[in-house]
Amino acid sequence: MTAAARTGAAEAGPRVTDHRGGVWSIAVPIPDNPLGHTLVHLLETGRGPVLVDTGWDDPDAWDTLTAGITACGFDVTDLHGVLITHHHPDHHGLSARVREASGAWIAMHAADAAVVRRTREAEPGRWLDHLIAKLAAAGAPDSHLAPLRRVRAKGPVRDLPGQRAALPDREIAPGALLDLPGRRLRAVWTPGHTPGHVCLHLEEEHPARRPGHGRLFSGDHLLPGISPHIGLYEDPDDATPADPLGDYLASLERVARLAPAEVLPAHQHAFTDAAGRVRELLAHHEERLAGLRALLAVPRTPWQLAEAMEWNRPWDRIPYASRTIAVAEAEAHLRRLVRLGLAEAVPEASGASGAAGASRAGAAGASGSEPVTYRAV
Ligand SMILES: [Zn+2]
Ligand SMILES: [Zn+2]
């Protein structure tokens, strides 16, 4: 971002919304991202303001955040604490800088704190090996694996995103009422988008007395017009197959039962009718699972399944990095189908001779990870 552009953004002023009752949102830009911005929420408490999420670690985002806090009538140095809905960099990116400027504590669910710790301590080369092996096992073609292998062959990998993310000082315990004087804010564990995602339920009457039960800071769990990415909880040290999509669907039902009068999400805009939005998302995933099961009438690897799935654009126009994410999404759906007894891995001998990608088996085999093929049951 050039200095001129930054001045321009500053002149326009931060986009701050007063949601009343001591709650504001600040639209903090995410550089080069179609999502546009993170809605960082500021909650006034008896011990000073508390932030829900912080935004992407970027100079322009920092300027917008601090100007936004000023527009709410506070200073960044007044901050008492930071509550993180989940560890993604558009939510947790600026936390270290906020803590440094204010002395505020940072709180996060233990499962996401473990991801932060693991990422900080990981040897980047090991992560890359893990990713290559995983993609090979998913049936990724050589053309997709080659760039990763080239980076690996170059020698030590220096930097991975998230390696400088702040370690939290406190844990957000599921179900707990948070220690915030003058407020009733309860943590609701909503795993799925990440293993330790939390929503925060402000159990106070809606300032406009809208029907329902308080307001919900929903992070990325419940968004008005986006179905959040559900991949796999990547952990090279844990071979237990998690079921993130199953977790997500159960978490959706959990927040619908809270029946909040209004939802304050971390992207897009505030909205009402949480239960209606939950129904839409449940129906979307149910439809998607049925569609994938139909595709598995022909045995396919996760990669082949991702190629055949419907995305927001044709597969050959999906950028490289997004394909890796798309395959993780396909695998999350496969895990759910397997858990439901609706799909199964094809035993190796018959998999190799299956209709799906015998040509690819050789390519992936070169990395030592044979691709696994799945079929409908
Ligand atoms: Zn996220
Ligand atoms: Zn996000």
Image: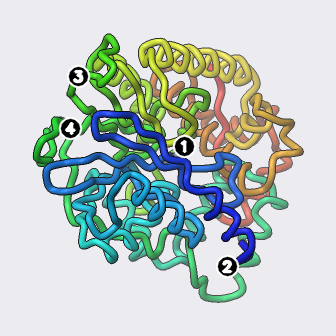
Query: How far separated are the C-alphas under marks 3 and 4?
Result: 12 Å
Q: Quadrant of the C terminus?
A: top right
For marks 4 and 2, give the one nearer the viewer: 4
- In the image, taking residue 86 as reference, residue 308 lies left or right, namely right
Q: Position of residue 35 (x, y in %)?
A: 65, 46
Q: Which residue shows up at 60% across the image and 36% down it?
A: 347
Amino acid carrying label 3: it is Glu
In the image, what residue occupies the spot 54% across and 55% down?
A: 28
* Residue type, mark 4 in image: Leu
Q: Secondary structure at mark 2?
A: helix
* In this rendering, position of residue 145 left or right of residue 82: right
Does mark 3 have its CB less than 8 Å from ligand 2? no
Amino acid type, callout 2: Arg
The crowding category of the residue bearing disc 1, from other C-alpha atoms within 10 Å (few below 14, some 14 to 19, many at least 20), is many
Circles 3 and 2, Cβ within 8 Å, touching? The answer is no
Give the mark nearer the N terminus: 1 vs 4: 4
Q: Earlier in the sequence, mark 3 or mark 1?
A: 3
Label whose residue precedes the other's in the sequence (4 or 2): 2
Residue placed under numbered mark 2 in the picture: 152
Look at label 1 and name its amino acid: Gly
Residue that label 1 marks = 231
For residue 185, the mark is: 4
